[in-house]
Amino acid sequence: MKNKSTDNRMGKTTKVKLDIKQLEAEIKRLKTLVYRDDLTGMLNRRGFSEEAGGMFNHLYSKHNPTQNKRIDTMPFGVIFIDIDDFKKVNDKYGHDEGDKVLKHTAKVMNRVLRDNDIYARWGGEEFVVALPQSSKKSSVRVAEKLCNALAESKIKLDGNIEKITMSVGIVMHSDETSLDEMIEKADRAMYKAKKKGKNQVVTFTHGEEESSYFLKLLHLVKSIK
């Protein structure tokens, strides 16, 4: 027969296990609140910076002894997305219908992107994607597939069928020392896509784009003086 002390120990052990499970569930819930976007369920900016930034630092950190080898064997791309004419949607239909556009875009991205791609809602109508272990050809193909998939999909807003498109910028890692630097370059490529007529993909060209950027910056500084 079991004595009372054995029963007490078993009872305490069961309670501890339940407490641990409850604690793990609460930690998971809090992580979701911190790292996930409420509206789309995607990673938010913080979650993306944590996950994709950690991978970038692992691959390209100066303190990583395998850095050069990894750069050769594991390319890294970043896509920056902006929904075209999103303000017009909000102005015409209201913010609730605008939220539907954001959720619709997130669904298209969930369907098109690959298992190892890391993607997030960056803020507002902007989204960002990290493409680890993806060649330039493959990365551009993913960006174009995203752009085409959204343009070919249809969404009903306040009873009207509307076509939603995106402008997309993409950059492949060259000599960038941070994920933020790559995002900034992909963002610049995205704005170039906007200027070229929207609903398209533009790839950041290292050297040419950077020279043009710094030349414009120099002219701006001179004009201020």
Image (cartoon, rainbow, N blue to C red):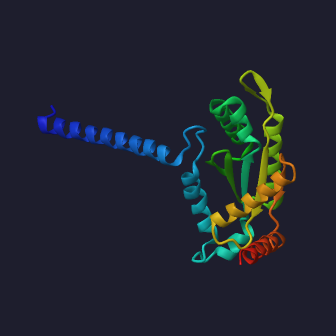
Q: Is residue 83 above or below residue 156?
A: below
- Between residue 87 and residue 221, name the one nearer to us: 221
Which quadrant would residue 74 be assigned to in this image?
bottom right
Q: Position of residue 45 (x, y in %)?
A: 58, 52
Q: Position of residue 128 (x, y in %)?
A: 67, 52
- Residue ID at (35%, 43%): 23
- Between residue 6 and residue 119, name the one nearer to us: 119
Which quadrant would residue 71 be assigned to in this image?
bottom right
In the rendered image, is residue 25 in sight? yes
In the rendered image, is residue 117 in sight? no
Q: How many marks?
A: 0
Q: Is residue 38 above or below residue 222?
A: above
- Residue ID at (48%, 43%): 33
- Residue ID at (70%, 29%): 93
- Between residue 41 and residue 22, name the one nearer to us: 41
Q: Position of residue 90 (x, y in %)?
A: 68, 35
- Between residue 213 and residue 178, name the one nearer to us: 213
Which quadrant would residue 18 be assigned to in this image?
top left
- Residue ID at (39%, 42%): 26
Q: Quadrant of the N terminus?
A: top left
Q: Position of residue 205 (x, y in %)?
A: 82, 67
Q: Quadrant of the C terminus?
A: bottom right
Residue farthest along the right direction in this orientation: 196
Residue farthest along the top direction in this orientation: 159
